[in-house]
Amino acid sequence: MSLEATLAEHERAWEERELLRRLYGEWYEEIVRELAPGPGATVELGSGLAQLKQLLPGVVATDVEPTRWADEVVDAHDLPYEDASLANLVLFDVFHHLRDPARFLGEARRTLRPGGRVVMVEPYCSPLSTPVYRRFHHELTDLAVDPFAPDARQDEHAMAGNQALPTLAFFRRETELRRRWPELRIVCRRRFAFVLYPLSGGYSRRPLVPVRLHRPLRALERVLTPLAPLLAFRCLVVLERR
């Protein structure tokens, strides 16, 4: 299926599922709160339906193929921006699709101005989420790979991915990340989404709970926050250019 066709399905799910809109809307708000202020453009890579524009109209929405939602076609491995010119790079469910994460991190280091940020919302592999992802999600969840090495499997199509990459790169292999890209400092790293996200069905499955349970389930998630390493399905990671 083409990227355009996949996104058209996502658009239908977005319009039909209020719980999905509320959940993802909260995550977009988290992204906006973490953006670096000041000069330079904010570019969203793999922007999909470009929902971030609802909160941040000036963001440059890009995707790896032409779509009716994207402002520009941009490959995260070869950013068409000048050195130290960007304020922010936003990746929402994009890092785990990269065929060469190390190359992207090098491009982020090059194109971000001092104080500029990479802000990401990505899957997280916890003891709870890992078997669920492997059983119910179409993408790989391979924790045995080197997260900084190219993976030819990611070239199969635009939506191919390995959901384990963010966990490996920013949590389990953090020391190597700091050694290889010392200019990209981790300034925020938070695990979340214990109940609502799996019950929402995401874009691919019908929700398992009604939208009226959104507020009580959010309250439950706050109570469960100390158990995030064991329960989380998602993570927020922010890197800042020194």
Image: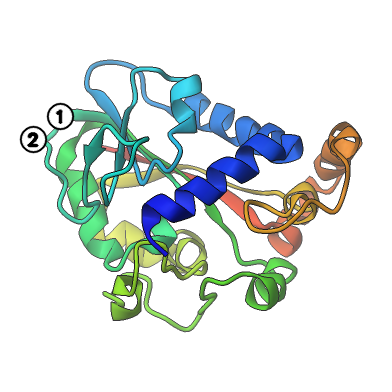
Sort mark 1 into few (<14), some (14-19) or many (20+) by Cα contacts within 10 Å: some
Residue under the point 37% across and 25% down: 36
Sort mark 2 into few (<14), some (14-19) or many (20+) by Cα contacts within 10 Å: few
Residue 77 against residue 156 in the figure, above or below = above
Residue 152 against residue 22 in the figure, above or below = below
Location of residue 64 in the rendering, given as x and y in whole percent from the top left corner = 27, 51
Query: What mark, if any, has residue 72 been given in the picture?
Result: none
Residue under the point 64% across and 77% down: 134
Question: For the residues marked 1 and 2, what is the alpha-carbon distance in whole angstroms?
Answer: 6 Å
Location of residue 82 in the rendering, given as x and y in whole percent from the top left corner = 8, 35
Q: Is residue 200 visible?
A: yes
In depth, the one of 236 and 20 nearer the eye is: 20
Residue lying farthest to the left in this orientation: 82
Location of residue 200 in the rendering, given as x and y in whole percent from the top left corner = 76, 49
Quadrant including the C terminus = top left
In depth, the one of 86 and 4 nearer the eye is: 4
Residue 123 against residue 140 in the figure, above or below = above
In depth, the one of 43 and 168 nearer the eye is: 43
In depth, the one of 83 and 68 nearer the eye is: 68
Query: What mark, if any, has residue 82 been given in the picture?
Result: 2
Quadrant including the N terminus = bottom left
Circles 1 and 2: CB distance less than 8 Å? yes
Question: Is 29 placed left or right of 37 in the picture?
Answer: right
Question: Is 92 placed left or right of 221 in the picture?
Answer: left
Residue under the point 74% across and 34% down: 18
Query: What mark, if any, has residue 85 been given in the picture?
Result: 1
What's under tag 1, amino acid-wise? Ser
Location of residue 155 in the rendering, given as x and y in whole percent from the top left corner = 29, 72
